[in-house]
Every structure is written in structure tokens, then in C-alpha cells.
Amino acid sequence: MIKKISVVACFFFSLMSNAQSGSASPYSFFGLGESRFKGNIENRSMGGVNVEQDSLHINILNPASFASVRFTTFTMGGNYAATNLKTDSGSENAQRTTLDYLAVSLPLGKMSVGFGLLPYTSVGYHIHSTTTDPDGENNVMKGSGGLNKAFLSLGYTVIPNLVIGADVQYNFGRINNSNLGYISGVPIGTYEENKADLNGFATNFGIMYKHKLYKKVNLYSGFTYAPQSKLSSSNTKTIATVTYNSDFNTAVIDAKDSKEIRHDMTIPDRVSFGFGAGQTKKWMVGTQMTFQNVGDLANDYNMSDKATYGKYSSYSLGGYYVPNFNVFSKYYQKVVYRGGLRYTKTGTIVNSEEIDDKALTLGFGLPIPPSMGSFTSGINIGLEFGQKGTTAKGLVQENYFNFSMSFSLNDRWFGQRKIE
């Protein structure tokens, strides 16, 4: 049954991933785009906290966690986002549906292997800028694409309660940016398109430790470090004269210029650590902090004299509660109830205003009954209510709601089966 669910889920989320762009934020123009949450829905529902050594769920954020997973585990998550984009003069609504991640963990004794794919950043904006001057130029700016991450992780149990890990990542993707300049009443305009093909390798190292504090209460801690890495960008710029219709779809009359430029970008080093306390499969509360230095993220397609880049930092507080994990008669007592708070300084500064992001998160872990597979597998639901940016200095404030769903499916692949 679990295998059948996996096939159906893959098909369902594949359709979801093609539905819309991964971002609807005008701030995705800057840097590599809007940074996506790079963990699973279980962690996201707790504000981003990921300090516990979980034997049933994959923790994508810390490669050391793979050593704790006791089953062959497949997990996949998707997200629906509704955003209200607000300025001093008006507001617009946007929706998008995306595939957030696919990951697999294979336990091999003290060592475990994990691999997967997830979006790293997303670009998705559509801005129409008009002027009151009848002879002035109007602009329609569009962006799409983003950066993806494929990873291979190794986790190892050094001693009971102490696990370490590392992963190798291949980052790849394409970012498209275009700008149509036109004068009202004139059917011909100037069109500039920039395409950036990105690729590069990166690494990430992690460690997790559990220590008994009192009777059944444990202390959890986790640490990750991602060294600075390079990202190669092959940029193609095209300038053309075009015609356009009422929907601002263009048709090229004459391509004036097309050239390719190579440019290296720097993804800065990143460190994250957290602490928590709790009882295994009962409750946990913890905190997580992440810091990232300033990188060289400017490129030919996203240069702006209105934007600079500072240090990134994120602070999370969250946890979970399970009424009774071992009960069989009352299903609701096996449900995992999650919650958290998150505050992020994105490091993007526009018009001298730093773009901050804050959110309240909630979530539920719904076990799959034995008749459908196993109580070790489950469906996870996450809710996120957040606000990003500000309306000050002509900027955009984003009020957003995210609904996330994932499957975490467990099975034994390498155990010896007995026939009676």
C-alpha cells in the first residue's frame, strides 16, 4: 500500500509543481531570488527548529540526522501559497503551488545514506511601472526561474546519541529577467532579456547530540556549517525591437544585440545551531539560530543602485506535542501537534530599508493507520502566516499564507524476512 501511495503522491505533486512559479515576490529580482525554506514540513511547522534526532522523519537541514533514521524513508512535500502584495497606493493578490522537496534515506547500520532534490531559490515577479508623462517610457518587468539543489548525504553514528554527517550539493538552474519599455500609443517598444544559467558545487557539515537531563527528559543540540562556495553564471543578454499586444506579449521585429558573458558569484558561508529539551515521541521545545555572511550575489541581470546586501540571520522557536504515541484505540492521541515562531533578516536592503520576514507556524502529523501501511508513516500538514517587507519608501509589503502537505513513508528494505 505504501508503494501505491508513493506513486500516486509523485504524480500528484508533479502536477502541482508545474502549476505556477515558485515565487510571487518582487524582492525575488535581487540576488539569486527568493530564498526557499530548505527543510521538511515537520521542521517548518516548528518555525524551522530541527534539533531532535528523529528515527522516523528525514531532517534535510542537518545531514547528521540521516544516521538516526531507522527505516528506509521516502518523503515528499508541496506547498500552496496565497500572498497579498500591498503598497501605499494599492494591493494585488497572487497564488502559487509548488513542489518543495523529494528525499530518500537508506539506513546501513551505523551509516546512513540520503539523497534528494529541492528548490534553493525562486524568481517570480511581474511589475508594471507607468508614468504620467504622455511621452515618458513605461516598463513591464518579468522574472522567472530559480536555483535548485540536488544533494547526497552521509550520516554516521559515532557513539550512541552522537551523530555526524556531511552532504555534497549540486546547485543548478536558470533565471530569466525581461524588461519591455514602451510609450503609450506607440505599438513598438524596446525589449531586453537576460538569461542566466547557473551551476556549482557546495558542501554542508553537521553534528547532533542527545544527552539525558532527568529521567525521560533529554537535551538536544544540533550544529551545521556550510563553507563558502562558488556559483558559475553564463549570462545571455538580448536587446530587440518588438511589437506588443494588450497583454504585453511581444513579437521580435529586429534583434539588435545578443552576447554571452560568464560571471562567478559567491554564496557565503553559513552556520546554524540550536538547542532543545523534550521526551522522545512525547514533546519537545527548542530554538534555532542561523547566520550567513555577505556574499557576492550581484550579476548582470539583477544589478540595481537601489539595492545592497547585508548579513542574513534567522531566529526560530518551536516544538511539538503528542498526547499518546503508543495508543491504538484513539487516533487523535497519536497526532503530532506542532507550532513555532520565526523571524528572519533576509540580508536584502532596498531603498535603505532591510527586508525582514516574520511568521507564525502550525502543523499536524497524521499517522497512516496499519490497514494502509504502518503507524510509522504519516501525512504532515503545515500552516504558515507571515509578513515580509514594508510599505515604507515606496516598497512592497507581502502578507502571506502557506498551506503545506507532505508524505513521510517508511518501510524495511534490508531486513531478513522470516516465513512461518
Image (cartoon, grey):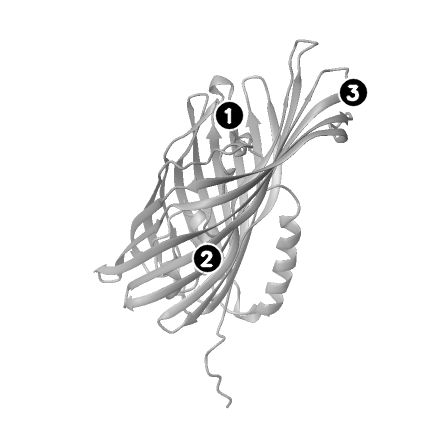
Q: Is residue 223 left or right of residue 58?
A: left
Mark 2 or mark 1: whose residue is earlier in sequence: 1
State the CA–CA distance, disc 3 to disc 1. Answer: 28 Å
Q: Quadrant of residue 214?
A: bottom left
Helix, strand or loop at label 3? It is loop
State the CA–CA distance, disc 2 to disc 1. Answer: 48 Å
Assess whether mark 3 and mark 2 are in contact (beta carbons under 8 angstroms). Answer: no
Task: Tell me the tag on residue 187.
Answer: 3
Task: Tell me the tag on residue 304.
Answer: 1
| 20 and 57: which is toward the camera | 20
Between marks 2 and 3 in the image, the one whose residue lies nearer the viewer: 3
Height in image: 185 above or below 5? above
| 7 and 176: which is toward the camera | 176
* Amino acid on which disc 3 is placed: Pro
Assess whether mark 1 and mark 2 are in contact (beta carbons under 8 angstroms). Answer: no
Helix, strand or loop at label 2? It is loop
The quarter in which the N terminus is drawn is bottom right
Task: Tell me the tag on residue 137.
Answer: none
Residue 27 image position (x, y, % from top left)? 52, 31
Q: Is residue 247 left or right of residue 409?
A: right
| 86 and 28: which is toward the camera | 28
Q: Is residue 87 left or right of residue 274?
A: right
* Amino acid on which disc 1 is placed: Ser
Residue sitting at 32 percent across and 67 percent down? 157
State the CA–CA distance, disc 2 to disc 3. Answer: 60 Å
Height in image: 62 above or below 228? below
* Amino acid on which disc 2 is placed: Val
